Image: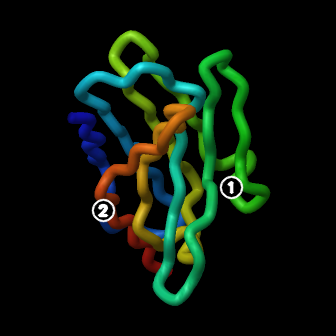
Amino acid sequence: QVQLVESGGGLVQAGGSLRLSCAASGSIFRINAMGWYRQAPGKQRELVALITSGGGTTYANSVKGRFTISRDSAKNTVVLQMTNLKPEDTAVYLCNIDGGIRDYWGQGTQVTVSS
């Protein structure tokens, strides 16, 4: 059984930084990409950043230049370094693995940015 465990969320003031980490355990046949999504109250889930098996990255326009995604393929871990956080970054952040046949999701970690 595959499990994704996120850590690193919390409360931070605007302009601050947080580092989110997601570790996947269990047997995953293939990983096309690993990424982070977020969902704020009353809003749709949106892609924040992802990194492919080849190392290519994609970022939401709203986080470009502030967030950096990285991965450790050997450990099936993905990290999201967030800097210069803004109140509009407040959301539940969810880790995702694109396994080709199916997606895997973590339970989410809350990020709250105060103004």
Q: Residue at x 31, y 31 (%)?
A: 24
Q: Residue at x 52, y 35 (%)?
A: 101
Q: Position of residue 85 (x, y in %)?
A: 55, 61
Residue highlighted by disc 1: 63
Q: Amino acid at mark 1?
A: Val
- Residue 15 occupies which quadrant of the picture? bottom right
Q: State the mark number for residue 10.
A: 2
Q: State the mark number for residue 47.
A: none
Check the image and report above or below for 32 versus 110.
above
Furthest toward the bottom, the residue is: 42
Q: Residue at x 29, y 41 (%)?
A: 4
Q: Earlier in the sequence, mark 1 or mark 2?
A: 2
- Residue 113 occupies which quadrant of the picture? bottom left
| SS label for mark 1 | helix
Q: Amino acid at mark 2?
A: Gly
For the rendered model, the colour scheme is: rainbow
Q: Position of residue 107 (x, y in %)?
A: 29, 58
Task: Measure the C-alpha gap from mark 1 to mark 2.
Answer: 18 Å
| SS label for mark 2 | strand
- Structural crowding at the residue carrying mark 2, measured as other residues with C-alpha within 10 Å and reported as few (<14), some (14–19) or many (≥20): some
Furthest toward the front, the residue is: 101
In the picture, measured across the screen, residue 26 lies left or right of residue 29, that is left
Furthest toward the top, the residue is: 74
- Structural crowding at the residue carrying mark 1, measured as other residues with C-alpha within 10 Å and reported as few (<14), some (14–19) or many (≥20): some
Q: Are marks 1 and 2 in contact (CB under 8 Å)?
A: no
Q: Position of residue 102 (x, y in %)?
A: 48, 41
Check the image and report above or below for 8 versus 93.
above
- Residue 61 occupies which quadrant of the picture? bottom right
Front in this rendered view, residue 42 or 97: 97
In the picture, measured across the screen, residue 79 lies left or right of residue 64, that is left
Check the image and report above or below for 19 versus 26.
below
